[in-house]
Image (cartoon, rainbow, N blue to C red):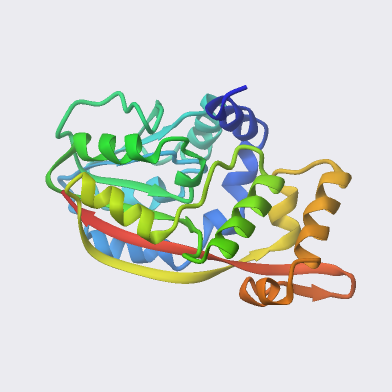
């Protein structure tokens, strides 16, 4: 089974969890993206890999129309039910690396907490550039790996253990190289430490107790320097939370 089929299988099974997930449905980045993008009432927007539709929901109040796209039909159907009262949101089953839209269509393109599932991010960024209008803005928000290889390897391994559809959390340097290659100019960026509530994080993708134990064991037995970096917090015998790096960046075509 290829990586995209893994994504479809995982998200079809867990579609409602991404609507209710506190990691996805809340966060300081949601109101901040409105402040940064300054959307206008005559604009058309696209939210790539919309998941539970949280960005589409926030942006819909400020633009003429927004398309919420996702690779997984079941996810999109569930999100459409959740957002049924938002009449200017349309839905499209779409591969982030082969977007079914014309060149120079959108004033705004967004992608939040999803790109680490994309097998070929260079194709994704090229597609974003193609469908953006000249001077259009692109907002990417995603988990990122630290520049240090040991920390990069660790976070990507634990993410893969917890979610087989995870491909790779890239470094900021890797994303910047792709932006540069596609003539996207960074206007604004911000890094933050994002706290993950451990039980909710594992329960969202893992049903098997043995798999959950393996993730817990891996985190608890990491070298102290790594546990300190990811701020692994243990209450009693159980992990209660840990942190990962997240990057928010706005670019202009």
Depth order, front residue of 123/39: 123
**What residue lies at 80% left-to-right and 41% top-to-bottom?**
207
State whether residue 233 is above or below residue 132: below
Residue 115 location in percent, x, y? Answer: 45, 45
Residue 253 location in percent, x, y? Answer: 15, 48
**What residue lies at 15% left-to-right and 45% top-to-bottom?**
42
Residue 86 location in percent, x, y? Answer: 39, 41
State whether residue 85 is above or below residue 5: below
State whether residue 171 is above or below residue 51: below
**Horizontal side of residue 171 vs 175, given as left or right:** right
Depth order, front residue of 92/225: 225
**What residue lies at 34% left-to-right and 26% top-to-bottom?**
98
Residue 33 location in percent, x, y? Answer: 33, 61
State which quadrant residue 150 falls in: bottom right
State which quadrant residue 229 falls in: bottom right
**What residue lies at 41% left-to-right and 28% top-to-bottom?**
95
Q: Quadrant of the N terminus?
A: top right
């Amino acid at each position: 089974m290829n990586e995209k089929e893994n994504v479809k299988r995982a998200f079809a099974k867990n579609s409602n969890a991404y609507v209710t997930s506190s990691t996805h449905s809340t966060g300081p980045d949601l109101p901040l993206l409105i402040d940064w993008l300054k959307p206008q009432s005559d604009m058309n927007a696209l939210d790539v890999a919309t998941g539970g539709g949280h960005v589409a929901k926030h942006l819909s109040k400020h633009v003429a129309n927004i398309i919420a796209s996702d690779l997984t039909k079941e996810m999109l159907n569930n999100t459409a039910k959740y957002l049924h009262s938002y009449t200017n949101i349309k839905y499209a089953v779409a591969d982030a690396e082969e977007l079914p839209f014309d060149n120079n269509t959108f004033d705004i393109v967004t992608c939040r907490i999803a790109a680490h599932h994309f097998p070929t991010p260079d194709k994704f960024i090229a597609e974003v550039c193609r469908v953006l209008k000249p001077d259009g803005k692109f907002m990417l928000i995603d988990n990122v790996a630290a520049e240090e290889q040991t920390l990069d390897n660790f976070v990507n391994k634990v993410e893969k253990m917890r979610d087989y559809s995870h491909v790779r959390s890239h470094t900021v340097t890797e994303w910047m190289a792709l932006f540069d290659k596609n003539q996207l100019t960074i206007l604004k960026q911000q890094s933050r430490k994002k706290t993950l509530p451990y039980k909710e994080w594992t329960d969202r993708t893992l049903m098997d107790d043995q798999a959950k134990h393996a993730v817990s064991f891996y985190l608890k037995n990491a070298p102290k320097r790594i546990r300190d970096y990811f701020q692994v917090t243990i209450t009693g015998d159980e992990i209660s939370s840990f942190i990962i790096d997240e990057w928010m960046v706005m670019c202009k075509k």
